[in-house]
Image (tube, helix red, strand yellow):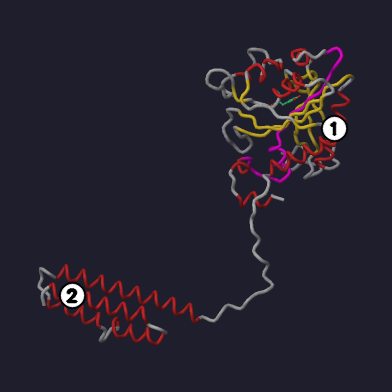
Amino acid sequence: MNLQDYIAQADALERDGSAALQGAADADALEAARIAFLGDRQGQVKTLQEALRAISKDDKPAAGKRFNEARTRLESLHAERKTSLDRATAPAAAEDRSLPARRQWRGAKHPVTLVIEEIEGIFRELGFTVAQGPQAETEWYNFGALNFPPNHPALDAHDTMYLEGEGLLRTHTSPVQMRTLQKYVPPIRVLIPGLVHRRDPFDASHAPSFEQIEGLCVDEGISFVDLKATLNRFAERLFGASRTRFRPSFFPFTEPSAEMDVQCGVCGGSGCATCKGTGWIEILGAGMVHPKVLEAAGIDSERYSGWAFGMGPARIAVSRYGIPDIRILYDSDVRFLEQIAE
Ligand code: DAH
């Protein structure tokens, strides 16, 4: 047989076989078509394979290739048809009406947003309003107005992201203290949530951009007692009836300055992984507003005094929800977010 005739036969076989296999109405018809075309003994495919022997040596590779194509196609059509017939005739799976319906994920608030909103609610009750300020700041608002000396290490390009020309991305929300003091007359009570940026690479406890919440209270006759009473009340509301402690600290814009720790709610103060064995969780920095800050805003520091604080709600979210790595908060993986979302 010459090559042309062989290929014509293969074409015809493939066409007829396809029609028979695809058109098989049920399992019996399919089996009959399989035997007729793909059957081992007298199947037409087998016959075509045997006809290869009569092909000249030169034409054999081309004929063999065509034969293989036709066979493979018919085999896969058979498998396909079998699967679809099996599926159509399989008994319907018993219905389980006790199975809970699949809940739809509609999205929800991020854990850090939940913490910020809760903190805003607590301070609103205490008479604070919520304010915001720009993320692109001038050096003066970010550092100078806050009494940072010109050679302070925080100004280092190592920690700070400077913008081309003038300005920088604020490294904390404290510059909004000055913007508020310039804009309003005391009594002032504001809470300032917002994003801040530092050249910290991502690791388990640091992110280069993160939320802060600043608080500021300025009026006549404000003392450290007001600071402690307000922040203790806040800690009580946010963490339950836990104890707090104030440790002396330093910030250029407050004097005196303190850091507030809250007794660990997980272990009750005996020491665990959440509090790294210390029994305490560091929550915020605070202090009495430095007279130089008030004066820079044109506020008489003899008449008025105030206190301020700054904290990181992501840190609070991490300890509250037992999150092992702060980076998870920024991955936008809904499988994680869904566990916490309300
Ligand atoms: N701005 C400080 C920081 O980013 C936090 C801070 C500390 C803010 C003490 C304050 C304060 O208002 O009184 O680390």
Q: Ligand 1 is located in which of the four quadrants?
A: top right
Q: Between 262 and 78, which is closer to the camera in this rendering?
A: 78
Residue type at numbered disc 1: Gly
Q: Label 1 to label 2, Cα distance in Å?
A: 91 Å
Q: Position of residue 89 (x, y in %)?
A: 49, 82
Residue type at numbered disc 2: Ala
Residue 91 lies in quadrant: bottom right
Q: Position of residue 322 (x, y in %)?
A: 70, 45
Residue under circle 2? 8
- How packed is label 1: few (under 14 Cα within 10 Å), some, or many (20 or more)? few
**Marks 1 and 2 close (CB-CB < 8 Å):** no
Left or right of 57 on screen, residue 128: right
Q: Between 197 and 200, which is closer to the camera in this rendering?
A: 197
Instruction: Check if residue 255 falls in the magenta segment.
Output: no
Which residue is painted at 60% across and 28% down in the image?
A: 198
Query: In the drawing, what numbered circle is on residue 91?
Result: none
Q: Position of residue 282 (x, y in %)?
A: 75, 33
Which residue is painted at 79% across and 30% down in the image?
A: 260
Residue under circle 1? 127
Give the number of marks: 2
Q: Is residue 266 above or below residue 282?
A: below
What residue span does the magenta drawing correspond to? Answer: 301-326
| Label 1: element kind | loop
